[in-house]
Amino acid sequence: MNIESERIVILGAGSAIARATARLWAARGARLVLVGRDQDRLNAVAADLVALDCASADAGVELAKMVETLGGLDILLLAYGVLGDQTELERDPSAAATLIQTNFTSAAAWCLAAAAIFEKQRAGALLVIGSVAGDRGRRSNFIYGATKGGLARVVEGIAHRLAPFGARAVLIKPGFVDTPMTASITKKGLLWATPEQVAEAIEAAAERGGPVVYAPKFWLPIMLIIRHMPTFVFNKLNL
């Protein structure tokens, strides 16, 4: 794709990964609409600014406005989500419902809205940041993981739907990333990536690959092992 003429919408543009990706695209001349709840973060990043709570907005209506602003849509990056505290989520059903609304229900709505546009124009790329946490339920974050696992099925299904039309959908699955969202987690070891490393994977996914891309790539064999690990072994692990 000729990135210099690309029209890109980034949902959750205030996140560390989204900011890093926006910088890559902006440096190559793309036109950007950055969408997020925090105006100060948006002001630090970019071009066209849209302050919006993606979790509660009408995806179809709002995306249509953005497309009109840009004069079309070539790439949509969905980069928002919340991690939540597993213990609190287990104790408070309303908190769990809010997380599910944000990470899955609203995200799926935006994906479907973008898919309709890309199918009609027979071109475009839907890029969605998922997580390796969605590959198998673990006691430490299974509610968050369930939202990412469900979103993965949506994106994979959209990729299958769009394939005959020449458009694409790609789920990017990071592992541990050093961002404000993971600030409460002790960061150590070679498994941790930077937002810039994930951004490079997203930039590449906009042009090729999919429907699932692990970022960094070493998470593919790791999660292959975890997904196929026998239950009696898996249950002994503190994951």
Image (cartoon, rainbow, N blue to C red):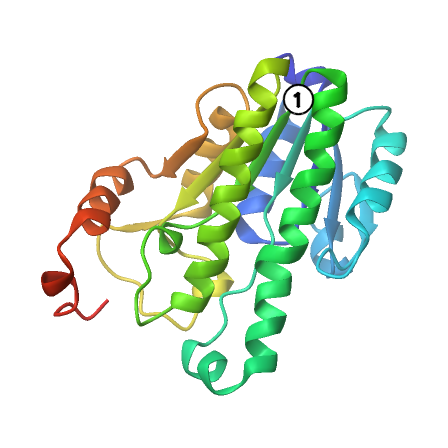
The image shows a total of numbered marks equal to 1
The quarter of the rendered structure image containing the N terminus is top right
Q: Residue furthest bottom?
A: 91
- Observer-nearest of 74 and 165: 165
Kind of residue at disc 1: Gly
Q: Is residue 6 above or below residue 236?
A: above
Residue 214 in picture, x, y percent from top left: 36, 38
Q: Which residue corresponds to mark 1?
A: 124
Residue 77 in picture, x, y percent from top left: 62, 38
- Side of 158 where 42 appears, left or right: right
- Side of 76 where 127 appears, left or right: left
Image quadrant assignment for residue 36: bottom right
Residue 237 in picture, x, y percent from top left: 15, 67
| Picture residue at 25% right of the left edge, 61% below the top | 188
- Observer-nearest of 189 and 55: 55
| Picture residue at 45% right of the left edge, 81% below the top | 90
| Picture residue at 16% right of the left edge, 62% below the top | 234
| Picture residue at 24% right of the left edge, 66% below the top | 239
Residue 85 in picture, x, y percent from top left: 46, 76
Q: Is residue 26 above or below residue 12?
A: above
Q: Can residue 16 be spotted in the picture?
A: yes
Secondary element at tag 1? loop
Image quadrant assignment for residue 64: top right
